[in-house]
Image (cartoon, rainbow, N blue to C red):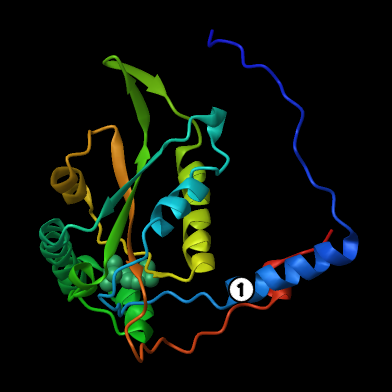
């Protein structure tokens, strides 16, 4: 049995309904401005922003509160470059045979290819690892709903970075085992997303995508 944790009174602010509606609209307006960016400026990020965004991500709900995630923040140019070379190697294989034709067709609108200069240019790369299980004194301990927990935490990380004024890219140069090797992470951790973070490059262009309307993503019963 794990030791008991005392219960404390919840701190919760009940707000006037008009304020709630205004806040929900403002938050949607802010999040609707978020775009995934593939061209980054090399400008450095103000101190503390990434740390606060990771603090925010780590408030995510998780199975049995195990917080089965680890965030590696890479700003060292040599390590970023190693990551770029390894990611480009995987992506070359992805684009030259590993991705089936329908996948390549679906990607065409993004004009992506195996060339990933942003892995050198973006001032920070956050590598999100899921902890499939924990290792406590050499003993294997269970984590729960790992994919769900890490997915929620990643969403909160992306939202927090955007709220702070930073752009990011959800990059998945699969398979990503090279990240364990380069970053020296143990084998209970599996990389999920490689997230370049920074300011968009001057004049960055993004595809003119439309989001599904509410009726297409919500059904009332
Ligand atoms: N990881 C590759 C391919 C890629 C796959 C999907 I699904 C995307 O939405 C975007 C890219 C790359 O980064 O080029």
Percent of width and height locating residue 71: 35, 46
- In this rendered view, identify the residue nearer to me: 7 or 146: 7
**Label 1: few (<14), some or many (≥20) within 10 Å?**
few
Q: Quadrant of residue 140?
A: top left
Q: Is residue 113 above or below residue 164?
A: below
Percent of width and height locating residue 65: 54, 30
* Residue in the image at 53% along x and 62% along y: 159
Q: Is residue 26 left or right of residue 107?
A: right
Q: Do we see residue 5 in this rendering?
A: yes
Q: Is residue 178 above or below residue 115?
A: above
What quarter of the picture does the C terminus occupy? bottom right
- In this rendered view, identify the residue nearer to me: 176 or 69: 69
Q: Is residue 149 left or right of residue 11?
A: left
Percent of width and height locating residue 4: 61, 12
Q: Can you identify the residue that label 1 sits on?
A: 30
Q: Quadrant of residue 111?
A: bottom left
* Residue in the image at 12% along x and 59% along y: 86
Answer with the quadrant where ligand 1 appears in the image. Answer: bottom left
* Residue in the image at 22% along x and 33% along y: 186
Q: Is residue 146 left or right of residue 140?
A: right
Furthest toward the front, the residue is 47
What quarter of the picture does the N terminus occupy? top right
- In this rendered view, identify the residue nearer to me: 170 or 29: 29
Q: Do we see residue 100 in this rendering?
A: no
Percent of width and height locating residue 105: 34, 81
Q: Is residue 158 left or right of residue 44?
A: right
């Amino acid at each position: 049995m794990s030791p008991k944790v005392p219960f404390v009174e919840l701190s919760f602010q009940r707000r006037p309904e008009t304020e709630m509606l205004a806040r929900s609209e403002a938050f949607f307006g802010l999040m609707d401005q978020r775009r995934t960016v593939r061209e980054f400026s090399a400008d450095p990020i103000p101190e503390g922003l990434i740390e606060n965004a990771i603090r925010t991500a780590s408030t995510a709900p998780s199975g049995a509160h195990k917080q089965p995630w680890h965030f590696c923040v890479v700003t060292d140019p040599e390590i970023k470059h190693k990551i770029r070379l390894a990611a480009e190697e995987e992506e070359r294989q992805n684009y030259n045979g590993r991705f089936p034709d329908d996948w390549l067709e679906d990607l065409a609108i993004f004009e992506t290819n195996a060339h990933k200069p942003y892995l050198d240019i973006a001032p920070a790369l956050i590598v999100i690892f899921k902890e499939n299980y924990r290792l406590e004194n050499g003993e294997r301990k269970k984590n729960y709903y790992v994919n769900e927990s890490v997915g929620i935490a990643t969403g909160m990380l992306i939202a927090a970075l955007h709220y702070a004024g930073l752009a990011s890219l959800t990059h998945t140069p699969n398979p990503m085992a090279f990240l364990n090797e380069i970053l020296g992470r143990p084998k209970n951790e599996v990389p999920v997303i490689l997230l370049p973070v920074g300011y968009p490059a001057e004049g960055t262009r993004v595809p003119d995508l439309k989001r599904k309307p509410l009726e297409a993503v919500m059904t009332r019963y």
